[in-house]
Image (spheres, grey):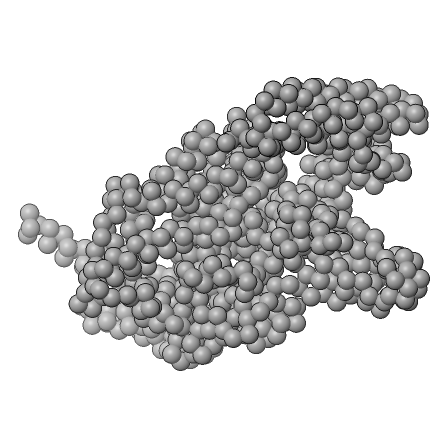
């Protein structure tokens, strides 16, 4: 009956590291002994209950089958994307896009309409609460990981999600880089390491140079739409076709059944990493569907997906300016790297056996915690130097993109451009900022349009406006402009091409503002009461035991007194007081607990004798 | 020059690449925004600005060619995109051969391969003479040497584009 003493006097607030994954999410923290996962895996699934409450995690995952129309998964695929980007996803995923989704997608969940950052915020809030429960203190600051190949809008959307969840996102870290940190590869003083990260929905490859605690990313490449989801969809397609011919019925519109089947398919997929064959096993009411998938068929199915990862690997090696022979280590991250075919393809390409010692599902969160430790000052000997995955440029005459910051530049990175007017009396200059590697504007991704306004009317070409583009350590663009003639800051309007404006995010924070501190207190009280219920119940029961009667009068009175005091404290809203009284009751019942324990052990031993 | 200042270096053309790298790592350790996450917003911004310039500086100065390009730009000399006159005839022949190969004429391949080798050799020669000019200029900053460097860089850039072009075509067509 003894409870864990919780240290409430932690001097500095803890920064947590969060892996916000396509399929699953995790939260970790840096301890004296190293990074530690704080609670179990939280499925990145969000659902709206019949009473209109939004839930996230395992509970929401159950709702995928019972209430698919109010539940959403793999929303990471929609982060920072516009309507035109997601047409392919819509064919494969049951996303219900709400009306008037233009630059920001909106999803319909029951009668609620939410943007991807708001949905992700619910997953983050769940992780935040889990972390608070374990740490026993409010959590307000976090490092969140993103795929290395995420563009500006996708990163911004992730940061927005953090803000909406009441988290100050101190840093976005690239997932493969975080994994390298977790592997503690810096024990090797010098060396070149490749990180191959194939997860639920994204693929990244990064090549790093390690130098005395510095993790310098040399190059990164990837595909933000490639991962386990794609394999699930392939298997699902097979199963749906089977069912159609077996049952003589197209069930693909039955969302609940499809989700049940999807779950069966995922189980089979996971089993195939370890077994030569596995069954897709579905029971839907009285109807059954079973199909065996062997490794040969599975490999044939996924080969194109594995093949698609190898191109980015080759170009990444080239961009890093290294040869395969120079690579010292290869690290595997993400659930799909458990698949033997993936491992052998990677081994063949890099010509070395990849590291698989750490749990590929946890390694990114652990790395995020190390980065949190770096920011918090607890980890002083490590430093991450990451790069921007995509070139940044502006639109110039004839629809061409002029690059200002090249991909694989170490961040923060900056560029300065001088702008002027083209006609007499012009008062506005429009700058269109893009990201991508192609030459034509239409093949690049539009980031935002900056309108330099209120320029003093003068002769064409006289204005001198200096615009500074800075990609910060999160990989997010910041733009500032200065009028060189007046030396004053140039005013401008920013219209992001995708995603939320600052005002929209602010509004969402206000709307969903869970007053973090108060909420946390409330939960602490609730939990203390649950514990109080447990110990009061246990003590009541123990009083009926012979051992209670055997106690001294004094001991019995002490127990009664402690129980009464706890009952009094129970209804206060001070969780510390409740916990204090729980502890007192614990103390008072110590000898009783011992007596009962001895009795039980005695009985158990006797039992052993009889059997023997 | 801003980039040299960022790394605490004298503006010299010849640099020891290990020293440049060491300076970059040492300064990153001190200035990086990760070291200022609990600092005031002014300090944060300063760290970000300084690190951005440091990163830009390292990118430009670690490689002799980009370093010389930066040095020239700061000295008011822009690189040209035109073909160096002494190469005109050769480039003309090369373009013909490239066209033939694109058209499926495999007989152009040996000529291209030979040209590729010759141009790669030119790059090596250019790098060697650049190294020599660098030392000369650092010892005695003479405008004439700077002009030589300028001409060498122009030629080098042009040749290096040619090599890339030829390599691309040879690879594309060997796949078929």
Left or right: A516 as drawn, with respect to A612: right
Can residue A229 be seen here? The reply is yes
Expressed as whole percent of the image width and height from the top left, the position of residue B123 reads 72, 23
Residue in front for this viewpoint, A193 or A250: A250
Q: Give the camera-side residue of A26 and A569.
A: A26
- Taking the spot 49% from the left edge, 47% from the top edge, the residue there is A203
Tell me how many marks there are: 0
Is residue A249 placed above or below A209 in the rendered structure? below
| Quadrant (top left/top right/bottom left/bottom right) for the N terminus of chain A | bottom left
Answer above or below: position of A286 versus B11. Answer: below
Which residue is pictured at 39% across the width and 35% down the height? A344
Residue B69: image quadrant is: top right
Image coordinates for residue B95, horizontal then vertical, percent: 69, 29
At 58% from the left and 27% from the top, the residue drawn is: B105
Residue A482 lies, with reference to residue B118, above or below; the image says: below
Question: Quadrant of the rendered structure where residue A551 is?
Answer: bottom left
Q: Nearer the viewer, residue A187 or A314?
A: A314
Q: Tell me which corner region of the image, top left, top right, bottom left or bottom right, holds residue A109.
A: bottom left
Q: Is residue A304 left or right of residue A466?
A: left
Task: Give coordinates of residue A70: x percent, y percent.
Answer: 40, 72
Position of A477 with respect to A30 (left or right) is: right
In the rendered image, residue B82, in percent from the top left (x then y), is placed at 81, 34
Q: Is residue B146 left or right of residue A378?
A: right
**Residue sitting at 41 percent across and 60 percent down?**
A92
Q: Is residue A162 visible?
A: no
């Amino acid at each position: 009956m003894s409870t864990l003493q919780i240290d409430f006097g932690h001097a500095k607030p803890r920064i947590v590291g969060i892996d916000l994954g396509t399929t699953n999410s995790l939260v970790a923290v840096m301890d004296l002994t190293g990074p530690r996962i704080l609670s179990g895996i939280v499925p990145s699934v969000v659902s709206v209950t019949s009473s209109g409450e939004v839930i996230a995690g395992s509970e929401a995952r159950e709702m995928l089958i019972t209430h698919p129309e109010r539940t959403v998964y793999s929303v990471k695929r929609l982060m920072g994307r516009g309507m035109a980007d997601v047409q392919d996803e819509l064919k494969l995923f049951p996303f219900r896009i709400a009306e008037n989704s233009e630059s920001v997608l909106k999803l319909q969940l029951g009668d609620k309409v939410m943007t991807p950052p708001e949905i992700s915020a619910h997953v983050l809030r769940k992780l935040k609460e889990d972390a608070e429960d374990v740490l026993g203190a409010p959590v307000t600051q976090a490092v969140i990981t993103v795929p290395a190949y995420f563009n500006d809008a996708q990163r911004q959307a992730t940061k927005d999600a953090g803000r909406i969840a009441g988290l100050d996102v101190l840093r976005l870290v690239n997932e493969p880089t975080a994994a390298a940190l977790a592997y503690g590869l810096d024990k090797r003083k010098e060396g070149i390491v490749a990180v191959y990260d194939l997860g639920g929905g994204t693929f990244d490859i990064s090549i790093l140079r390690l130098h005395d605690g510095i993790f310098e990313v040399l190059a990164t490449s990837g595909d933000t739409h490639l991962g386990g989801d794609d394999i699930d969809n392939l298997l699902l397609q097979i199963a749906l076709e089977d069912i159609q011919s077996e049952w003589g019925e197209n069930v693909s519109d039955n969302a609940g059944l499809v989700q049940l089947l999807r779950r069966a398919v995922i189980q089979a997929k996971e089993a195939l990493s370890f077994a030569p064959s596995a069954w897709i096993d579905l029971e839907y009411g009285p109807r059954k569907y079973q199909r065996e998938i062997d490794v040969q068929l599975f490999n044939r199915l996924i080969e194109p997906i594995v093949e698609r990862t190898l191109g980015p690997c080759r170009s990444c090696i080239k961009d890093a300016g290294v040869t395969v022979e120079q690579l010292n280590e290869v690290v595997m991250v993400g659930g799909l790297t458990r698949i033997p075919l993936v491992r052998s393809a990677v081994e063949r390409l890099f010509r070395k056996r990849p590291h698989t010692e750490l749990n590929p599902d946890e390694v990114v969160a652990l790395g995020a915690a190390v980065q949190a430790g770096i920011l918090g000052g607890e980890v002083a000997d490590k430093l991450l130097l990451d790069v921007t995955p995509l070139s940044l440029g502006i639109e110039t005459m004839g629809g061409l993109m002029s690059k200002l910051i090249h991909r694989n530049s170490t961040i923060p990175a900056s560029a300065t451009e001088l702008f002027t007017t083209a006609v007499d009396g012009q008062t506005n200059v429009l700058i269109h900022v893009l990201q991508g590697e192609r030459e034509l504007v239409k093949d690049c991704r539009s980031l935002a349009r900056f309108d330099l306004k209120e320029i003093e009317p003068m002769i064409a070409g006289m204005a001198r406006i200096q615009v500074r583009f800075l990609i910060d350590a999160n990989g997010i663009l910041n733009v500032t402009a200065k009028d060189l003639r007046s030396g004053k800051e140039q005013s401008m309007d920013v219209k992001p091409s995708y995603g939320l404006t600052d005002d929209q995010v602010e509004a969402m924070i206000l709307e969903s503002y869970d007053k973090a501190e108060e909420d946390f207190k409330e939960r602490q009280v609730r939990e203390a009461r649950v514990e109080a219920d447990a110990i009061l119940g246990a003590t009541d029961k123990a009083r009926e035991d012979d051992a209670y009667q055997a106690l001294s009068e004094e001991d019995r009175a002490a127990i009664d007194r402690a129980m009464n005091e706890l009952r009094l404290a129970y209804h206060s809203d001070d969780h510390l007081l409740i916990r204090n009284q729980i502890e007192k009751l614990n103390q008072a019942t110590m000898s009783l607990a011992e007596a009962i324990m001895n009795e039980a052990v005695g009985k158990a031993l006797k039992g052993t004798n009889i059997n023997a | 020059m801003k980039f040299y200042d960022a790394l605490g270096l004298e503006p010299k053309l010849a640099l020891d690449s290990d020293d440049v790298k060491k300076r970059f790592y040492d300064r990153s350790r001190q200035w990086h925004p990760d070291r200022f996450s609990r600092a005031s917003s002014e300090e944060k911004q300063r760290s970000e600005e300084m690190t951005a310039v440091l990163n830009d500086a390292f990118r430009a100065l670690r490689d002799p060619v980009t370093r010389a390009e930066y040095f020239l730009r700061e000295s008011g000399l822009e690189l040209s995109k035109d073909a160096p006159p002494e190469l005109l005839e050769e480039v003309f022949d090369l373009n013909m051969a490239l066209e033939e190969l694109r058209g499926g004429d495999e007989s152009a391949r040996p000529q291209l391969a030979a040209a590729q080798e010759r141009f790669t050799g030119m790059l090596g020669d250019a790098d060697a003479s650049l190294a020599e000019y660098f030392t000369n200029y650092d010892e005695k900053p003479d405008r004439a040497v700077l002009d030589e460097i300028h001409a060498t860089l122009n030629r080098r850039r042009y040749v290096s584009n040619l090599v890339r072009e030829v390599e691309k075509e040879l690879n594309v067509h060997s796949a078929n």
